[in-house]
Every structure is written in structure tokens, then in C-alpha cells.
Image (tube, rainbow, N blue to C red):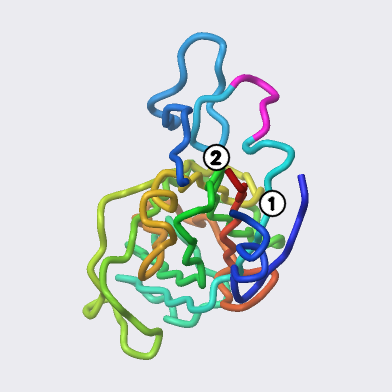
């Protein structure tokens, strides 16, 4: 599998690739596990040990170009670390924008939203559930707030961060990105606040440590 890192644009990767598809694997979640001998891996039922994309696909990693944190509690809009699921933060929505328009002739084998944990954090005291929802209207970090949020859609991915876990959050959004040929106005993380600590995730725009969209693209 070839690897290309493109923090600002897909143009370099798309220039080398030539019909879109959605993943054949059914969706799964901690509350809706897979049957048979399959395992729930990054939100999809897969055979144990199976790759998330073919070995000849091109991997592209896009860093979030804009981030805004909306909180019913006390979290700054430009927070570098956001405690999703923390009681003091209340309900939290993290708006993310990526330069991720994809041409019609490229096969999208995989698309994953990745957010890194704060390494110094002990992890949540109890499992924290996080939804990924599409943003349906335009926005900018300077003009949004908890009372002035852009329109949001229904969840297109979900994950549960176990207690004391500090591994990266990784959510499969392949079906959404393949259908939309990109992410439109962006994607948002959403969680309610019930944990004393929460899952403290790094939410810095345009940073190698910040939110990323990992794409696996392939010419037909």
C-alpha cells in the first residue's frame, strides 16, 4: 500500500488515479456487534486480520483546516484539547473541516476520521460514546458558538472510547465520503457530558497532532 501525506489538498493524489463505491462490509458498533466469525473493526464487520483497504490503494492523510469547539459548558471555541464526554464540559460538538473533495472517477476504499488523545490524560473514568455527524451548512470558527451552530445531520459513524483508554479515536466514515465524494461542509464529533474526566482529544487545526481524515483511494 503506497503512502502519501497531503495536509492541504487531494490534487496530487487524484492526478495519479483514474467509479465510486461504498464498502461491502456491514456497519457495526459496540451495541450492534457482528455475527458469525467476523469482528467489529473500525465500525465495520471484517474477517479477523483483514486489511481496511487493498494493498495497492493510495493512502492520503488530510489535516483539519478549520476546527471549532461548541460546548454547553465551559470549553473555549479554539480549545487545543477538548474533554469530550466530561461532565464539566457538558454537551460538546467539535466542528471539523477538511479539503477533501474527491473526483467522480476515483474509488474510495476507505475513509477514517482520526483524533489523537492527549497523552498526559489518564483516559475517561467510564466509556464515552462519540457520534460523527455531517455538517450541513457553511460555518467559520469566528462566527460559531453553542447558540449559533451550523445545521447538523444524523450520525454517519460512532465509536465508544473504553475507560482509561488513550488510543486514537478512529471512526469509519467511508460510506458517507463515498456518497458525497468528499465531506461537504465538514464533519462533527458529538458527545454528551456525564464522565468526571472525559476523553481528552487534541483538537488543533492544521497540525500533525490534530484531527485527520485518512483516505484510501484506488484507480478502477
Instruction: Give x and y (percent) for residue 208.
Output: 70, 70
Q: Is residue 81 left or right of residue 147?
A: right
Q: Residue furthest top?
A: 36
Image quadrant containing the C terminus: top right
Instruction: Give x and y (percent) for residue 172.
Output: 50, 44
The verdict on residue 196 being magenta is: no
Q: Which residue is mark 1?
A: 58
Q: Image point 46% across, 72% down: which residue? A: 97
Q: Dot 2: what SS?
A: loop
Image quadrant containing the N terminus: top right
Cβ–Cβ under 8 Å for marks 2 and 1: no
The verdict on residue 48 being magenta is: yes
Q: Image point 67% across, 32% down: which residue? A: 51
Numbered range of the magenta stretch: 47-51
Q: Which residue is mark 2?
A: 162
Q: Is residue 12 above or below residue 114?
A: below
**Mainly helix, strand or loop, the magenta region?**
loop
Q: Residues within 10 Å of mark 2 (few under 14, many from 20)?
A: some
Q: Image point 36% across, 70% down: which residue? A: 185
Instruction: Give x and y (percent) for residue 54.
Output: 67, 36
Q: Residues within 10 Å of mark 1 (few under 14, many from 20)?
A: many
Q: Is residue 149 left or right of residue 28?
A: left
Q: Dot 1: what SS?
A: strand
Going from the N terminus, do you reach mark 2 or mark 1 first? 1
Which one is in front, 71 or 3? Answer: 3
Q: Is residue 130 left or right of residue 201?
A: left
- Alpha carbons under labels 2 and 1: distance apart: 31 Å
Q: Is residue 38 above or below residue 51?
A: above
Instruction: Give x and y (percent) for residue 151.
Output: 23, 68
Which one is in front, 23 or 118? Answer: 23
* Number of numbered discs visible in the structure rendering: 2
Amino acid at each position: 500500500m503506497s503512502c502519501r501525506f497531503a495536509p492541504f489538498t487531494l490534487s496530487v493524489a487524484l492526478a495519479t488515479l483514474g467509479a465510486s463505491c461504498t464498502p461491502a462490509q456491514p456497519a457495526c458498533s459496540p451495541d450492534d456487534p457482528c455475527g458469525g466469525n467476523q469482528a467489529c473493526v473500525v465500525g465495520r464487520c471484517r474477517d479477523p486480520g483483514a486489511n481496511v483497504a487493498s494493498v495497492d490503494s493510495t493512502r492520503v492523510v488530510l489535516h483539519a483546516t478549520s476546527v471549532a469547539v461548541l460546548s454547553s459548558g465551559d470549553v473555549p471555541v479554539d480549545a487545543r484539547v477538548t474533554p469530550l464526554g466530561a461532565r464539566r464540559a457538558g454537551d460538546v460538538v467539535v466542528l471539523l473541516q477538511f479539503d477533501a473533495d474527491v473526483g467522480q472517477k476515483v474509488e474510495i476504499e476507505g475513509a477514517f476520521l482520526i483524533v489523537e488523545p492527549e497523552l498526559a490524560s489518564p483516559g475517561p473514568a467510564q466509556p464515552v460514546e462519540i457520534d460523527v455527524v455531517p455538517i450541513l451548512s457553511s460555518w467559520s470558527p469566528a462566527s460559531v458558538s453553542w447558540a449559533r451552530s451550523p445545521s447538523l445531520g444524523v450520525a454517519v459513524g460512532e465509536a465508544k472510547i473504553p475507560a482509561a483508554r488513550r488510543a486514537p479515536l478512529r471512526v469509519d466514515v467511508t460510506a458517507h465520503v463515498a456518497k458525497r465524494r468528499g465531506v461537504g461542509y465538514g464533519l462533527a464529533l458529538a458527545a454528551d457530558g456525564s464522565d468526571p474526566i472525559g476523553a481528552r482529544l487534541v483538537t488543533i487545526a492544521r497540525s500533525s497532532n490534530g484531527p485527520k481524515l485518512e483516505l484510501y483511494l484506488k484507480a478502477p
